[in-house]
């Protein structure tokens, strides 16, 4: 289970993206980057953050430590910014924290030195995971990678699992189908042996592992009265996520076949452009 920390001091906002995260000091364990349920994207963004982050951990991918951060009604009352005061007022209760990596910086393909920080053996598993969870936010424009300790760290998965914004459209056929936006992925043409990554990941994410991941998501986020699913109980929602994941893992995996095809086409196009420049 994830640790539950108590927010004690709002340190500074991180004004990137729509989730309005902030560096927050906790009573138990220092500084964390907290994403708030009161932000415009709501509790479902936090649910996606947790589920994808925990799946990445199961696959051995580098992700900052995760925690649940309790925001009390008294927290942030002295904050002078009215926008931040409103955000904290709408975020009482459980929120999501990621370990604050002091001194980390955003991954950039320029300067080229950052290109060599991502190990080759990491790229295919990251590409696989992002296709598996419908994550549109790992592109050349928006890599969502931090560099810290001369290692890459995966961050910002709140936009993934976007099917949970409209459960009625997620049929088994859609669950097994391709993820079209994978064609924009940062590692699409660089990932080696995506087939091997598929075999390893599918063997790791067993039903028991998936259930353990889903059990780590608090009921209060799943059934948030503002942006969650207040009319469906948490147990049923966990089963819905589980059914999507199991459908997606069932062979033959149509979405994987499409990923292989898209990757081959992108590599061929890249070779044509290189030859044309020569």
Image (cartoon, rainbow, N blue to C red):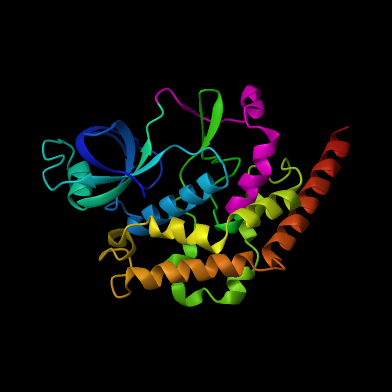
Residue 185, can we see it?
no
Tell me the quadrant of the picture where the C terminus can be found: top right
Residue 22 in the image, given as x and y percentages of width and height = 31, 37
Residue at the image position 16 percent from the left and 46 percent from the top: 72
* Picture quadrant of residue 262: bottom right
User: Measuring 55% from the left and 57% from the top, which residue is drawn there?
Assistant: 133
Q: Is residue 128 magenta?
A: yes
Tell me which corner region of the image, top left, top right, bottom left or bottom right, holds residue 173: bottom right
User: In this view of the protein, can residue 277 be seen by the observer?
Assistant: yes
Q: Which residues are magenta?
A: 102-130
Q: Is residue 34 left or right of residue 108?
A: left
Residue 267 picture location, percent across and down = 79, 46
Q: Nearer the viewer, residue 136 or 255?
A: 255
Going by the image, does 175 lie left or right of 39? right
Instruction: Please give the name of the residue rendered at 39% of the width and 24% of the height, measured from the top-left corner.
Output: 102
| Image spot of residue 198 (x, y percent) | 69, 54
Left or right: 260 in relation to 242 = right
Q: Foreground residue, 163 or 68?
A: 68
Relative to residue 108, is residue 59 depicted above or below?
A: below
Q: Is residue 187 magenta?
A: no
Q: How many marks?
A: 0
Percent position (x, y) of residue 126?
61, 45
At 32% across and 35% down in the image, what residue appears? 32
Q: Quadrant of residue 202?
A: bottom right
């Amino acid at each position: 289970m994830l640790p539950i920390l108590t927010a004690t001091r709002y340190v500074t906002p991180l004004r990137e993206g729509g989730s309005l995260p902030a560096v927050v000091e906790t009573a138990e364990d220092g500084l964390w980057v907290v994403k708030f349920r009161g932000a415009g994207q709501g509790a479902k963004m936090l649910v996606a953050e947790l589920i994808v982050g925990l799946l990445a951990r199961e696959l051995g991918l580098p992700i900052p430590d995760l925690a649940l951060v309790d925001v009390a009604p008294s927290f942030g009352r002295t904050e002078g910014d009215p926008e931040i005061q409103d955000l904290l007022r709408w975020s009482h209760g459980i929120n999501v924290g990621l370990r604050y990596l002091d001194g980390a910086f955003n991954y950039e393909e320029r300067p080229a030195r950052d290109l060599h920080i991502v190990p080759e053996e990491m790229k295919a598993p990251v590409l696989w995971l992002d296709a598996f969870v419908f994550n549109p936010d790992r592109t050349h424009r928006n890599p969502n990678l931090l560099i810290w300790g001369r290692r890459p760290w995966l961050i910002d998965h709140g936009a993934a699992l976007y099917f949970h914004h409209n459960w009625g459209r997620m049929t088994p056929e859609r669950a097994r189908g391709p993820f079209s936006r994978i064609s924009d992925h940062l590692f699409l043409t660089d990932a080696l042996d995506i087939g091997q990554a598929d075999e390893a990941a599918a063997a790791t994410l067993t039903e028991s592992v998936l259930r353990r991941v889903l059990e780590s998501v608090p009921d209060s986020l799943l059934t948030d009265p503002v942006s969650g699913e207040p009319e469906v109980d948490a147990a049923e929602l966990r089963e819905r996520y589980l059914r999507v994941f199991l459908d997606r893992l069932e062979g033959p995996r149509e979405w994987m076949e499409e990923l292989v095809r898209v990757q081959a086409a992108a590599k061929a196009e890249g070779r044509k452009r290189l030859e044309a420049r020569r």
